[in-house]
Amino acid sequence: MTSIQRLLYFLTLHRTGLAVCMVSLGALLFPVLDDNPYTLGLSHLVAINTLVVLGLNLFIGYAGQISLGHATFFGLGAYGSAIISTTWAVSPWLSLILVALCVALLALVIGIPVLRLSGHYLAMATLGLNFVVYTILIQWDEVTGGPSGFAGIPALSCADFVFDTPVRQHYLLWAFALGAMLLMLNLVRSGVGRGLAAVAGDEIAASSLGVNTQAAKVKIFVLSAVLASLAGSLFAHSFGYISPDTFGIFASTDFVIMVVVGGMGSIWGAAFGAAFLTLLPEWMDIFDTYKDLVHGGILVLVLMFLPQGLVTGLMDMLKIRWALRRHNASA
Amino acid sequence: MLQLNNISKNFAGLPALCQVSFQVPQGQLTALIGPNGAGKSTLINCITGVAPCSSGRISFDQTDITALPAHAITRLGIQRTFQNLRLFPRLSVLDNVLTGLTCEGGSSLFMAMLRLPYLRHRERRLKLRALEALDRYGLTAKAHWPAGVLAYGDKKRVELARATVGNPRLLVLDEPVAGLNAEETCVVAEHLRQLRRNGQTIVLVEHDMDLVMNAADQVVVLDSGQCIASGTPESVQRNPMVLEAYLGRMEATA
Ligand SMILES: Nc1ncnc2c1ncn2[C@@H]1O[C@H](COP(=O)(O)OP(=O)(O)OP(=O)(O)O)[C@@H](O)[C@H]1O
Ligand SMILES: [Mg+2]
């Protein structure tokens, strides 16, 4: 082997680890290059959305199901953490964990009966849940603050180190986002991950290969709900203020659109989709005014031309091209 | 090894299988033949738990598997292929074969996310085994292709590799050479004989009579959901009921 071949081999062998290192480096250096609070606020949102989309992407791409209620879990995480830490004066970290456990339980209670049915009943169940929770957030104003929102949520802290400046929060949020990304990358590259990919591809084949398809779907649903709840809690503790509008049905569909833009079952795509849709309004004002219209249009276009989503669809096309080229070269 | 007692299966009241009973002895190749629509695939679906039977009892090594779900039956050591391919077209050929090792890949989501060193080693071992299987079936050059772009014959062999890679105790094959040309059929037949020599217990559904009569130790004949004959290839070939089931059909269609 020449040294170039050896280098290429090393790069392909460790491509995932290297890519994670690059992204981490980017996140690490970002505040050094640009510490404008507004830009950092955007990067916070990207990190938080990435966290939600990672889980939802796994659920849509690997369990082959759609949830139209991830904003609910996101909102429950945010409000739960806010209420427990402010009203009951529990430490923010503890409230984050408590509420994540409760959300896991809720997802389990919904997931077990609904995911037993084949078909997209879960989409409807989660849609209903989203309406219910949204209405509660608005109506029950003595606890949730009602439409005007909930303010004065304490920031997270480690001993005396309080995550109260945008730069510190940037590191906190990206540590969570990248940590989750690493865990998900590990998951999809394992035997369990292949089993999940099999479930999304063909349930009958998957179960004949030894995958407990129902349990797998429920597990991924719970995992994605916990990630959303975690993201919600981090959102509440970083921004200090939350209002119900962040957690409505359109937020849920936005998460789904982020998954679709990124590509189903692609971990890198999840981050890309989250970043793309979060930053889109910043680039063009028109997207701000007609946000829902544009998002809907993107959804329709992507699904029409690349049903697997943008990043995954393009990757698939590249892989097929590459295979055919190799085939023609050898024939 | 595998024992079927009075298996019946109805589809919305219409009987597809009626009181089928036979045994699959260990280390032998049992062929299941019969005209189109006889219920062979249905019977396989009953055995592997894909479509549970309506009545009767199936036991595998003294374990009653009649009511077990498909994944539990697979974990007992039964692997199968499908008549109409069921590969995962978006996964690479290697990953497709690796899914055949699902039972050995662990099932804890949490451990998979941590990817501790022991898990990495196990992954590497599984990958080596999958590569060996690909090598056996002559697919090494295409290991990283998406399975969807393979030619039909290659897909059939990927399914065979996926079903055999985990060294199942019972291998159930639904028409492994259907749609293959003569040359490809020869290759697959040789693989089957090799498996048989290694002591693999096999249930084979097949229309190719040459293959069946050459490779099988025991032949079971189904017709319209009923088991009309069973025995050695020679005795079945001479059985008047079997001749009628096949010839009668031919006259009717001629
Ligand atoms: N899901 C189903 N619903 C209703 N009827 C079915 C179903 N699956 C199979 N059948 C019927 O059961 C009978 C047996 O079908 P099966 O597929 O088992 O035949 P086979 O012996 O495998 O035939 P072939 O040689 O063509 O594969 C057929 O008459 C078929 O129409
Ligand atoms: Mg059949």
Image (cartoon, rainbow, N blue to C red):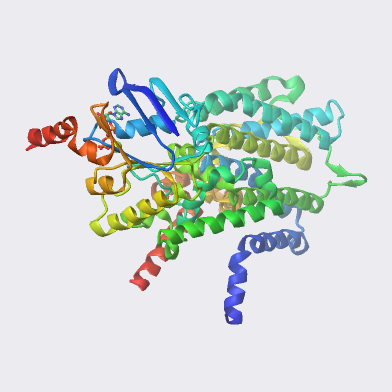
Q: Is residue B159 left or right of residue A151?
A: left
Q: Quadrant of the N terminus of chain B?
A: top left
Farthest-out residue, top: B13
Instruction: Report the number of discs.
Output: 0
Residue in the picture at 43% in, 52% down: B161
| Left or right side of B162 for B246 | left
Q: Is residue A86 visible from the viewing direction of this image?
A: yes
- Asked if one can make out residue A264 in the rendered structure from this viewpoint, the answer is no
Quarter of the image for residue A21 reads bottom right
x and y, in percent, of residue A261 in the image: 51, 49
**Displayed-image quarter of ligand 2:** top left
The answer to whether residue B18 is left or right of residue A35 is left
The foreground one among A68 and B221 is B221
**Image position, residue B64 (x, y; %):** 49, 25
User: Residue A124, relative to residue B106: is it above or below?
Assistant: above
Expressed as whole percent of the image width and height from the top left, the position of residue A74 reads 66, 35
Quadrant location of the C terminus of chain B in the rendered image? top left
Q: Nearer the viewer, residue A290 or B89?
A: B89
Q: Is residue A64 left or right of residue A75?
A: left
Q: Is residue A66 above or below residue A161?
A: above
Identify whether A227 is placed above or below B97. Answer: above
How far across and how far down the image is residue A256, in percent? 54, 40
- Residue at the spot x=50%, y=59% of the render? B131
| Nearer to us in this view, A107 or A188 | A188
Residue sticking out furthest to the bottom: A2
Along the viewing direction, whichever of A318 and A157 lies nearer the viewer:
A318
Q: Residue at x 38, y 31 (%)?
A: B23
Q: Quadrant of residue A154?
A: top right
Which residue appears at 69% of the width and 35% of the height? Answer: A229
Is the residue B97 above or below the residue B74 in the image?
below
